[in-house]
Image: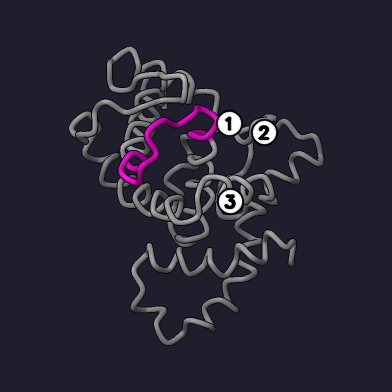
Amino acid sequence: MNTYSSLILKSEDVLLLLTKLQNIGWTAIREASINRILYLSAVLYSFRYPDKQNIFKDDYNFSRTLSGPEDAEIEKALIHLVNNDLVIHTYEGYVCTEIEHTTISIENYKVKEPWFDDISYILGIYGEDKIFDFIFRDPEYKNSLESNSLFRLNIGNDNDTVKYINAFKKAFENKIRDSKDKLQNKEYLRLYFEYVFGKILRGEK
């Protein structure tokens, strides 16, 4: 993907994500938070859909920074959105001014909208602090930090975080086996995080 196309795609992703977060009452989002949520979206996609190609993997290049995972192009995407009056930059963070998806390509909207809707749902339930605590305990991120690695963080199906949270999946699905096939994606994710957060935050293996 050339630089311009990559910038447009990430600008669309950021705009779509901001509209979803605005719908759950998050009005101003900091750049570091946008990077973290996009990273979380990418990693959890590999967990939830292990047999599908990750819709973020080929387009995002996250590296470890002191403030969390970061794709260097997100800053450029935010500047692009501000310059086109789709987002404004306030003291508290970035605020979406254009909430119609007509500014987002139909193809990208169809692919990303349902997933960002699910991610925003989880964020709305558990809150920013708990989700970000999960990210900083994220094995992929943590292993990179401990090894002082500056390489790209793996967001594919074989990353350390997916392996880690998959370790709880069998036990979790045994608990909900009577209703598993009836659960919508949002409800599955809510129940799974309700189950797995306690274990991860207690450092269980």
Residue that label 3 marks: 130
Between 82 and 59, which is closer to the camera in this rendering? 82
User: Amino acid under label 3?
Assistant: Lys
Q: Secondary structure at mark 2?
A: strand
Residue 77, by quadrant, is: top left
Label 2 CA crowd tier, 10 Å (few <14, some 14–19, many 20+): many
The residue under the point 56% across, 54% down is 157
| In the image, residue 123 above or below residue 49 | above
Residue that label 2 marks: 64
> Which quarter of the rendering shows the C terminus?
bottom right
| In the image, residue 58 above or below residue 72 | below
The region drawn magenta spans 20-35
Residue that label 1 marks: 70
Mark 2 vs 1, N-terminal side: 2
**Where in the figure is residue 94, as x and y percent of width and height?**
41, 25
Residue 189, by quadrant, is: bottom left
Residue 12 horizontal side relative to residue 162, left or right? left
Q: Secondary structure at mark 1?
A: strand
Residues at discs 3 and 1 in contact (Cβ within 8 Å): no
Between 41 and 195, which is closer to the camera in this rendering? 195
**Extreme right residue here?**
147
**Where in the figure is residue 203, as x and y percent of width and height?**
74, 61
**Extreme top residue here?**
83
